[in-house]
Amino acid sequence: MRVLIVAPAWVGDMVMAHTVVQVLQSDNPDCEIHMLAPKSTAVLGTRMPGVTSVHVLDVGHGEFGAGKRWEAGRAMKALGFTQAIVLPNSFKSAWVPWLARIPKRSGWLGESRYGLLSDRRRLNKRAHTLQVERFMALARAPGQSLPSPIPKPRLLADTGQARSLVEQLGLNLNKPVTVLCPGAEFGPSKRWPEQHYSKVGSHIVNAGGQVWILGSTRDAPVGESIAAQVGSGVHQLAGRTTLENAIDLMSLARRVICNDSGLMHVAAALDIPLIALYGSTSPDFTPPMTDRAQILRLGLPCSPCFQRECPLGHLDCLRKLAPEQVISRL
């Protein structure tokens, strides 16, 4: 078997896609597994055990990119895949496997993809309540049971690269490192207030530790604000590192404190102890797949709402989640 996994564009979903790799390997030890992924998440595939190769689809978010998909289809056709597993539910994500004439093209029905998928599935949300279950189900025949326990996603850090980054960025490992991840690409409703992060950061520094703030360029202003409030002992790295850099740097941390975000799933896949903060979303759908996570949430009647911004305008689900509750778990 040679299988092409059409990978998600969200970091967290991409990390969880490693469960599909593990199911395929378990069922077919000689299976050769490739990934077709956007630039935003492709590097994660290169850090997953069991992935033979990652093919980058250079199409921006929201862009159809017909010409680029056509070229990718021709390239994938030459590799002779026997099956494609299309994890995203969009119409455009199923295009390349169809253009590549891959015989078996598996995916949830999604955006009316009748002609593009040869192995079309109708999702029963009650049968598969977790995102990872919906991914793994596509790697097995319809109705076939899923592995229990669920395999945990894993990412491999480059220790040598991590040490080089410490030197390049003027960091040190003289004090235990706690990583803060105050961002969330989905929207403001998933972000614990920066003032709360600052109080936790101050506690960590005063207790003899140091703080590294990781995130994307969009998270840099929040990271800078937290660093300014805490003062010395904090290294603001959001926007200064790539996703690959973040994987390697995070592997050096003693623990991670984060929102429900892509970096939360990265920390889980690195098997680092973490505290995950949930507000508008739910760990009943996308929990960190690790035994080393502590989940904090208030469980207010208005949550989870799964909205990008608080529809009630108060964000109580996170604002009222006090810093002291996090500090008590450290």
Image (cartoon, helix red, strand yellow):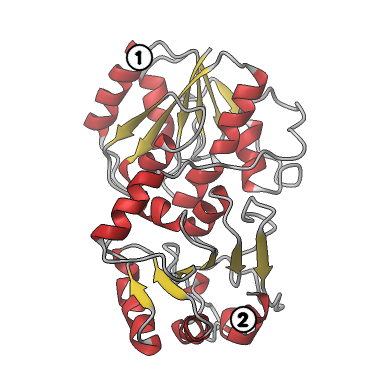
Q: Quadrant of residue 218?
A: bottom left
Give the residue number, with chain letter if any, for mark 1: 77
Foreground residue among 233 and 38: 233
Residue at point 38% right, 36% down? 37
Can residue 65 be seen from the camera position used here?
yes
> Residue 154: horizontal and vertical position, in percent?
55, 42
> Residue 28: horizontal and vertical position, in percent?
62, 16
Q: For the C terminus, give its image quadrant.
A: bottom right
What is the total number of numbered labels drawn onto the structure image?
Answer: 2
The answer to whether residue 106 is left or right of residue 184 is right
Q: Secondary structure at mark 2?
A: helix
Foreground residue among 162 and 131: 162
Q: Quadrant of residue 295?
A: bottom right
Name the kind of residue labelled 1 in the image: Lys
Q: Secondary structure at mark 1?
A: helix
Q: Which mark is residue 254?
A: none
> Residue 86: horizontal and vertical position, in percent?
50, 31
Residue at point 60% right, 67% down? 275
Q: CA distance from mark 2 to mark 1?
A: 53 Å
The answer to whether residue 297 is left or right of residue 196 is right
Name the kind of residue labelled 2 in the image: Ile
Q: Which mark is residue 327?
A: 2
Please determine whether, in this image, residue 156 is positioned above or below residue 323.
Answer: above
Foreground residue among 104 and 190: 190
Can residue 91 be seen from the camera position used here?
no
For the residues carrying marks 2 and 1, which lies nearer the camera in this image? 2
Mark 2 nearby-residue class (10 Å; few <14, some 14–19, many ≥20): few
CB of mark 2 within 8 Å of CB of mark 1?
Answer: no
